[in-house]
């Protein structure tokens, strides 16, 4: 049994040079709590490692323990580009550098420099959105669900909202549209069936209690076969005839036609407005390729009503989001250079030959580190993800790892997550797949993979 009387005091360990990097990164309180927890475990078990009085041993143990409690960059090699759990759309280092003065110094966030009076924090972004989409007006909140919630609360508080049963979606984290509608203060009125809904279903659901009409783009799933849905122009005409606002929740929403780069088509907000929608909501951190935000476009008087809703203040976007979103929208003014300057589009449009070159290099490194695996370069498919184009994917190249009988793919996944920069991959068809669309920082990735235990 180890002599627990040799356990050093917490203060002595905290003052040791070996723990200084941990203190700087994680803070005194977190390190102190981790030290106490470690020593308490030894006291309860009656055993401790040989290094129980060596600060260097504590530093090694706490490094692994504490690193999982911090946000840190990872390599997303899952084959899902816009990954909800991994931060969604990648951001531009160049744009972040441009906005640094705007978020580290006082800024005219809600101050009109021309008049010297209070201004509209959405005003600058609103003007850019109007010019890019042709919308009458726009406003921004902190995410896509908040955008829909604000619309529902403003125009249908205590009133009914007909929604097709085929559009009662559940998004990530078990958040469901009916629950969002309930919390918004409106009453869901289901119409049609899961696979088929007709205009007559909506018309039959409208009465004096109806607050608005809503169509939800089923962005995270796809129904095929014997199906029918009501077209936007038909719903828009019905809403106008009934004197009701008509909102389309797009989920993702792209401001450019993705087919120009050979990518699948995604409905654009400006198209939906042209089809007669009064309001369109979509996210900023999906196909737009920007910060997390909820964007609402539409008729001026409706946007004005949204801005007057007290809930708007609770859901408003902060200065970092608005500054980065503004810079991102500026990129869209030159669509010809967008694929080179917008990281998300750059990932989606990288040539397969480039991806294959990445894969060959990654395979050579892994062959050195993992002799117990059969490692190959394979054609693959990746999904855009996060509710974007759920029924379509794009060609990609992956490195696949097939284990020998005495090797465990789950154990390898754990080892990859424990690397200095964690590597997140997926298991499918008995193999581990590393999708190369997420391997832009190739040199960093290969150096990182060389840290795998051989």
Image (cartoon, rainbow, N blue to C red):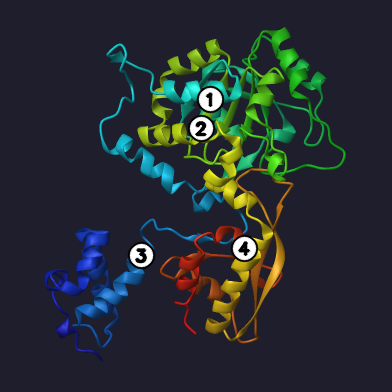
What residue is at 40 percent from the left and 58 percent from the top? Answer: 72
Foreground mark, 2 or 3, reads 2
Q: Is residue 417 left or right of residue 155?
A: left
Foreground mark, 2 or 4, reads 2
Residue 344: give x, y in percent of width and height. 56, 47
The 10 Å Cα crowd at callout 3, few under 14, some 14 to 19, many 20 or more, is some
The 10 Å Cα crowd at callout 1, few under 14, some 14 to 19, many 20 or more, is many
Q: Nearer the viewer, residue 341 or 145?
A: 341
Foreground mark, 3 or 1, reads 1
Q: What distance separates the C-alpha of mark 3 from that of mark 1?
A: 40 Å
Residues at discs 2 and 1 in contact (Cβ within 8 Å): yes
Local secondary structure at mark 2: helix
Q: What distance separates the C-alpha of mark 2 from that of mark 4?
A: 29 Å
Q: Which residue is mark 2?
A: 329
- Give the mark nearest the N terminus, 1 or 4: 1
Q: What distance separates the C-alpha of mark 2 from that of mark 1?
A: 7 Å
Q: Nearer the viewer, residue 439 or 163?
A: 439
Residue 323 - label: none
- Give the mark nearest the N terminus, 3 or 1: 3
Q: Which residue is mark 4?
A: 435
Q: Quadrant of residue 249?
A: top right
Local secondary structure at mark 3: helix
What residue is at 39 percent from the left and 27 percent from the top? Answer: 314
Local secondary structure at mark 4: strand
Task: Answer yes or no: is residue 184 visible.
Answer: no
Q: Which residue is mark 1?
A: 129
């Amino acid at each position: 049994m180890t002599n627990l009387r040799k356990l050093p005091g917490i203060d002595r360990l905290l003052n040791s040079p070996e723990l200084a990097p941990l203190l700087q990164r994680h803070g005194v309180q977190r390190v102190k709590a981790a030290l106490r927890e470690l020593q308490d475990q030894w006291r309860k078990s009656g055993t401790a490692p040989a290094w129980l009085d060596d600060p260097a041993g504590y530093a090694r143990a706490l490094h692994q323990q504490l690193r999982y409690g911090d946000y840190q960059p990872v390599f997303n090699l899952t084959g899902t580009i816009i990954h909800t759990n991994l931060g969604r759309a990648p951001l531009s280092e160049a744009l972040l550098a441009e906005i640094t003065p705007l978020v580290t110094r006082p800024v005219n966030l809600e101050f009109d420099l021309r008049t010297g009076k209070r201004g509209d924090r959405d005003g600058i972004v609103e003007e850019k959105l109007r010019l890019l989409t042709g919308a009458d007006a726009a406003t921004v909140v902190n995410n896509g669900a908040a955008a829909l919630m604000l619309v529902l609360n403003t125009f249908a508080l205590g009133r009914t909202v007909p929604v097709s049963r085929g559009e009662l979606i559940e998004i990530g984290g078990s958040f469901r549209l009916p629950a969002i509608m309930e919390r918004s203060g409106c009453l869901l009125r289901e119409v049609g069936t899961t696979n088929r809904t007709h205009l007559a279903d909506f018309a039959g659901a409208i009465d004096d209690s109806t607050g608005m009409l809503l169509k939800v783009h089923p962005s995270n799933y796809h129904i095929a076969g014997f199906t029918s849905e009501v077209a936007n122009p038909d719903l828009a005409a019905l809403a106008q005839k009934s004197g009701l606002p008509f909102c389309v929740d797009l989920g993702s929403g792209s401001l450019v036609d993705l087919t120009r780069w050979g990518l699948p088509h995604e409905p654009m907000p400006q198209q939906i407005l042209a089809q007669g929608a009064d309001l369109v909501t979509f996210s900023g951190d999906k196909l737009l390729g920007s910060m997390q935000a909820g964007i609402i476009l539409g008729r001026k008087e409706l946007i004005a009503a949204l801005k007057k809703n007290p809930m708007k203040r609770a859901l408003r976007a902060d200065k970092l989001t608005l500054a980065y979103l503004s810079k991102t929208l500026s990129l869209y003014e030159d669509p010809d250079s967008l694929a080179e300057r917008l990281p998300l589009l750059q990932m989606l449009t990288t040539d397969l030959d480039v991806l294959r070159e990445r894969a060959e290099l990654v395979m050579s490194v892994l062959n050195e580190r993992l002799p117990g695996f059969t490692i190959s370069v394979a054609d693959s498919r990746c999904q855009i993800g996060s509710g974007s184009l759920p029924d379509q994917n794009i060609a990609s190249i992956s490195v696949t790892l097939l284990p020998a009988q005495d090797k465990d793919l789950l154990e390898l996944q754990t080892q990859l997550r424990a690397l200095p920069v964690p590597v997140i991959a997926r298991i499918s068809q008995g193999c581990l797949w590393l999708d190369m669309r997420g391997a832009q920082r190739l040199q960093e990735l290969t150096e990182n993979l060389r840290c795998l235990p051989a």
